[in-house]
Amino acid sequence: MSDPAADPSTFVVDLDGFEGPLDLLLELARAQKVDLARISILALAEQFLAYLRRVQARQLQIAAEYLVMAAWLAYLKSQLLLPPAEREMEDAEAAAEDLTDRLRRLEALRLAAEMLQARPQLGVARFARGLPEPVEVTVTPLWRAGLGELFVAYGQVMRRGKPLRMTMPARRLVSVEAALQRLSQLLTGHDWRELRTFLPEDLGEPLLRRSAIASGLIASLELAKQGQIELQQTAPFGPIMIRRRSS
Amino acid sequence: MDQPSPKQILEALLFAAEEPLGEAELQDHLGGEVHVADLLDELQRDYAARGVRLERQERAWAFRTAPEVAPYLKRSRVQPKKLSRAALETLAIIAYHQPVTRAEIEALRGVAVGQGTLDILVEAGWVTPKGRREAPGRPVTWVTTQAFLDHFALASLDDLPRLDELEGASLFNPARGG
Amino acid sequence: MDQPSPKQILEALLFAAEEPLGEAELQDHLGGEVHVADLLDELQRDYAARGVRLERQERAWAFRTAPEVAPYLKRSRVQPKKLSRAALETLAIIAYHQPVTRAEIEALRGVAVGQGTLDILVEAGWVTPKGRREAPGRPVTWVTTQAFLDHFALASLDDLPRLDELEGASLFNPARGG
């Protein structure tokens, strides 16, 4: 890909081809054609930023990790250019060295990956037996159990013989049907009223009261769904207001 | 890397092949200068005393494990296994109620007892059928064996705690789960 | 028929299998009186100059065709799919830095590792999660498998070239080019 406006000596590649900002930096470093120990981080930062600017000029999307690296490199560059006394960054040289180390490590891993791929791979350069002969494997189970488990099992069997009787007391609850009926009958005007005011008043038992609230809410949602009423709640856990919908 | 010999290539071809290879096919593959028939004979001799043989079937060749080795190729493994809940319960009932019929075990457990469950206990050597109940159908009755006593380190069946003793031993505490 | 020797049995066992067999498993099979490790070494020497080799991969062994024969075997073999660069680098990082967390892989590569990349390696059977790092979040760590050694013909992880030596290699040597 050639960009006539750019310096022909600079490196121009498609961003899609890179595996992240370190990879791009590595490629730019290679183009410097010097030993990595002698690489100029300053020049590298400049090239990286220039590269991103060109990509941006083509209005291509740039992944966040490139932008983060660009910001960091711009900062590092500014620090390296300042005399040590004026630097905000404690150790700009050390940061530059760290980056060199990271690049060197990545390059070594990349080389290792290439060497791995060049090995005689199974199914490529080496083959397994094509006609494996199945070998019969007989598995003899060795059964184990403990005396304790045996007793527990026996006790449970014998207890199972005497069934426990359990009775569930009948509970009085307010059904959704009842709440629906009550709400439809009582809600007449078009003014906003709190849903709570429609609950039956003679509810002594807390459980019965809670069931009335729950079925009242479900009934109001059902009526709203049918388009008969409107619902409003201005804040979480705030009062729920309802009114008949004006037709 | 060294240049492999035609014999090495032949050997590798036969090893990696998914089916016996015909002599003509092999000859094609190795080219006209190579005398495949001779090489095959040579290979067959190389392997004559090994655990693997080069066998000719009609006009096709394949490596096969030596027939005399076959009995030694079978592998056996002993695998410790825990008894299932059903097997444990069945074993306990037989231990406490022997001699007991399958129908009686089922009545006590409240569920059917699969033949598989009894088979496992027989395989473990812990129960055995012994005698028949003098009742309609004369069903087989089950008892525990000496191996059962050995495995659970019981001197005799009298060593089994009585049900009321078990109740006191908090073994039935529901918190133990199960 | 003659009684086969332990070496013949060993040879047949390894030959019959497609997958590598563990040394412990083989020792189990042949019994305590047989010195399996010595026999395996002997077998490996027997096959050193043949078209098929006995390969060691850590504590497992398998017969595989000799690498130098490969160019002469290519007969309508389906070429396995090539790994992407991301997958290959991730594999190399796991091989060299195991046990390693995903975050550590990402730090080394300077780019996020997609779950898809790890999935490919897991599916190939070359890496597996193993244990967790005792660090905040207790992240899973990744290691390579026996199948990885088998696939890349590695007798052990020590067969991999050392990273510090690779770092010292003339990486940015202009001769290598960009």
Image (tube, coloured by chain):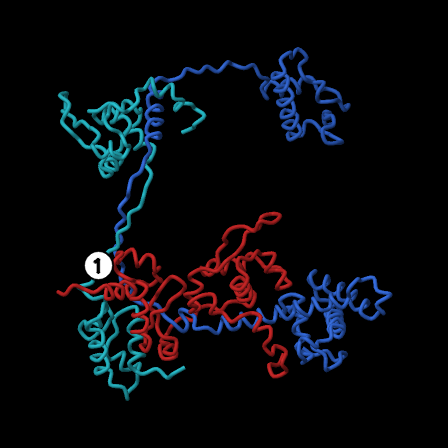
Chain colours: A blue, B cyan, C red
The chain carrying label 1 is: B
Residue drawn at (42%, 23%), measured in percent from left and top?
Answer: B173
Q: Which residue is mark 1?
A: B72
Quadrant of the image containing the N terminus of chain B: bottom left
Look at label 1 and name its amino acid: Tyr
Image coordinates of residue A177 in percent, x first then y, are 58, 20
Tag 1, which secondary structure?
helix
- How many numbered markers are drawn? 1
Q: Residue B19, percent across and down?
A: 27, 69
> Splitting the image into 4 quarters, where does residue B81 fall?
top left
> Is C147 placed above or below B162 here?
below
Q: Taking B106 as reference, is A205 left or right?
A: right
Q: Quadrant of residue C116?
A: bottom right
Residue A46 position in % (x across, y down): 76, 72
- Where residue A129 appears, x then y in whole percent? 32, 67
Q: A176 and A138: which one is in front?
A: A138
The quarter of the picture where the C terminus of chain B appears is top left
Which residue is outermost to the right? A86
Q: Nearer the viewer, residue A189 or A51?
A: A51
Residue at screen point 33% across, 38% down: B82
Return the residue nearer the eye: A72 or C79: A72
Q: Residues within 10 Å of mark 1 (few under 14, many from 20)?
A: some
Q: Nearer the viewer, residue A92 or C63?
A: A92
State left or right for residue C7 relative to residue A15: left
In terms of image quadrants, where is residue A56?
bottom right
| Residue at screen point 41% across, 15% down | A165
